[in-house]
């Protein structure tokens, strides 16, 4: 199987719409443990990406360039902690896609593993710290494992998504250890991490895009 | 919640625009990035550049502190969010006078990543040496054993003041960083919140608190503090804040301190002075001398209600830094 820049752009636009729809929900989650602006931050960043896609990137078909520009644009627009994290993810993913308009299933597996590892490295978070890594790490681990078994990217991604969802939900029972919410200690118990949630929605959007494109 | 804004998504841009117009004899916006402001005054060759920055919503922090004796430039972030590396790097280029640049900001994950990336880029792309001093003065935000996790609040003002003076004295980058870090190590703050702020884009309160409650140790983005207690008097609040600070840092009867009673945005100066009155009394009773005092809104949280108390223990070098005159749009000391 192959997925091209056309689908990758569809994915990015899908994320843009999803973030607008879930903006209030992300803020609501963040109010319980942070300053309540996660949805706003994501929206500012992805709206900037939308503008780039509509203008400079309209005719761009190089997946690496699309990925790098999305990351850098997001970073410039938001700063914050999610800015450097997502930018690092998209730039690491781009390395796999250098100069390519189409990637094979195996290359997409490498893309998402690099994406997840980059974020983990940049933020220095571990599983159990109640961050987006609680979704990303089990997702990437399962993706590699399931792909090695089946050589089927679509199926492996589907399984990895389930692992990511379990990870996301695990943050409900974790006391924050990193980031702004870590200062809450015990009071962060019972609240699902907004960063772990939004990354799950993004990964899910990639799957939905594959599904709709019938790849 | 009523707010005097035009478009909630453009509040930072419009504030910066107004600020630069109001104070064009002090600051200008860089063409390369509208979130980069630098002093218009010609700074000395080989003076260490002082760069402050952080999220918006803390006005007069941080843009209000660009001027003589304090910062040479500021990178302005979105509300309560670190600026991205771009504006930081642009300011760095603009204020470097060949002696390097010191970055001063509060201890937050986002700021550390963005300023860290900017410092790496300034080194790689522009060959500018960058030093860093990170404020973590809030005693309520983590226990003493985990001091490195504490967030920076109003004490950042003293770190800016000390570094700005040191740079003016002609210290080299290492010494400016050393003085800034020394200021931070000798500074402790703690705050109390009595009413929330409202983010312009969501209109939602940053935290929920009852009419008869206050939150001890509240962070200046509305992060929950140590405990919610029954609303107390100004004296009770001053007592709690000063005593928690003194339990964290050894300040004895031979010591001299600088004091800052900082308003969080909507607390009248009347109330801040009532709090200061008690702070002075407690310190005097303990034989601790107040070398210099600051009372007012120095680093706020939009319209949050409440205040924080900051003490900086002084030695001769820090006293000299505290005494150094400053001329900024939002802070003047003769």
Image (cartoon, helix red, strand yellow):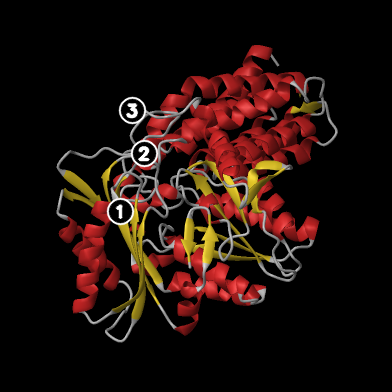
Instruction: Report the residue at 71% width, 41% height from top.
Output: A91
| Labelled disc at residue B124 | none
Q: Which of marks 1 and 3 is nearer the N terminus?
A: 3
Is A207 left, or right, of A192 in this rendering? right
Does the CB distance between marks 3 and 2 fall below 8 Å? no
| Labelled disc at residue B307 | 1
Does the CB distance between marks 2 and 1 fall below 8 Å? no
Residue B139 in view (yes/no)? no
Q: How far apart are marks 2 and 1 (CA)?
A: 32 Å
Residue B7, x across and y down, in percent = 51, 25
Residue A169 in view (yes/no)? yes
Q: How far apart are marks 3 and 2 (CA)?
A: 31 Å
Chain containing the residue with disc 2: A
Q: Name the residue under label 3.
A: B1
Categorize mark 1 by other alpha carbons within 10 Å: few (<14), some (14-19), many (20+): many
Work out whether residue A116 or residue B273 is closer to the camera in this orientation and state it. B273
| Labelled disc at residue A172 | 2
Q: What element carries label 3?
A: loop
Categorize mark 3 by other alpha carbons within 10 Å: few (<14), some (14-19), many (20+): few
Q: Which of marks 2 and 1 is in front?
A: 1
Q: What element carries label 1?
A: strand
Categorize mark 2 by other alpha carbons within 10 Å: few (<14), some (14-19), many (20+): some
């Amino acid at each position: 199987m192959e997925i091209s820049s056309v689908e990758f752009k569809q994915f990015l636009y899908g994320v843009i719409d999803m973030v607008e729809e879930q903006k209030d929900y992300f803020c609501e989650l963040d109010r319980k443990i942070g300053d309540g602006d996660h949805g706003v931050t994501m929206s500012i960043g992805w709206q900037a990406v939308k503008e780039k896609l509509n203008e400079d990137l309209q005719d761009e078909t190089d997946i690496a360039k699309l990925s790098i520009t999305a990351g850098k644009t997001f970073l410039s627009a938001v700063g914050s902690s999610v800015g450097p994290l997502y930018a690092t993810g998209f730039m690491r993913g781009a390395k796999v896609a250098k100069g390519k308009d189409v990637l094979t299933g195996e290359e997409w597996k490498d893309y998402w593993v690099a994406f997840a590892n980059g974020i983990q490295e940049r933020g220095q978070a571990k599983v159990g710290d109640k961050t987006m890594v609680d979704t990303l790490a089990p997702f990437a681990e399962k993706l590699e494992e399931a792909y090695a078994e089946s050589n089927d990217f679509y199926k492996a991604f589907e399984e990895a998504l389930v692992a990511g969802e379990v990870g996301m939900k695990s943050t409900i029972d974790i006391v924050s250890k990193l980031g702004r919410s870590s200062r809450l200690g015990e009071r962060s118990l019972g609240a699902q991490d907004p960063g772990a949630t939004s990354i799950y929605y993004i990964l899910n959007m990639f799957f939905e895009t594959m599904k709709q494109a019938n790849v | 919640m009523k707010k005097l804004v035009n478009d909630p998504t453009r509040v930072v841009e419009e504030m910066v625009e107004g600020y630069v117009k109001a104070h064009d004899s002090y600051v200008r916006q860089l063409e390369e990035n509208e979130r980069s402001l630098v002093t218009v005054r010609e700074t000395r060759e080989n003076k260490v550049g002082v760069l402050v920055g952080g999220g918006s919503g803390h006005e007069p922090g941080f843009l209000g502190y660009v001027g003589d004796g304090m910062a040479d430039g500021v990178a302005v972030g979105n509300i309560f969010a670190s600026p991205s590396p771009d504006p930081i790097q642009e300011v760095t280029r603009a204020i470097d006078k060949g002696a390097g640049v010191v970055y001063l900001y509060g201890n937050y994950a986002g700021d550390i990543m963005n300023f860290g990336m900017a410092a790496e880029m300034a080194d790689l792309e522009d060959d500018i040496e960058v030093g860093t001093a990170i404020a973590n003065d809030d005693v309520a935000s983590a226990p003493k054993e985990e001091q490195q996790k504490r967030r920076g609040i109003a004490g950042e003002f003293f770190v800016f003041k000390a570094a700005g003076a040191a740079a003016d004295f002609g210290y080299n980058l290492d010494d400016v960083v050393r003085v800034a870090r020394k200021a931070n190590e000798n500074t402790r703050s703690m705050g109390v919140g009595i009413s929330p702020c409202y983010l312009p884009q969501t209109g939602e309160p940053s935290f929920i608190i009852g009419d008869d409650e206050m939150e001890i140790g509240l962070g200046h983005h509305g992060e929950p503090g140590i405990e919610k207690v029954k609303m107390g008097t100004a004296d009770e609040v001053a007592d709690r804040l000063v005593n928690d600070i003194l339990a964290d840092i050894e300040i004895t009867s031979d010591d001299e301190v600088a004091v800052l009673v900082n308003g969080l945005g909507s607390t009248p100066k009347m109330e801040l002075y009532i709090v200061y009155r008690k702070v002075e009394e407690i310190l005097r009773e303990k034989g601790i001398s107040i070398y210099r005092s600051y009372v007012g809104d120095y680093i706020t949280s939009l319209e949050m209600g409440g205040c924080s108390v900051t003490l900086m223990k002084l030695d001769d070098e820090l006293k000299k830094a505290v005494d150094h005159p400053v001329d900024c749009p939002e802070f003047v000391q003769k």
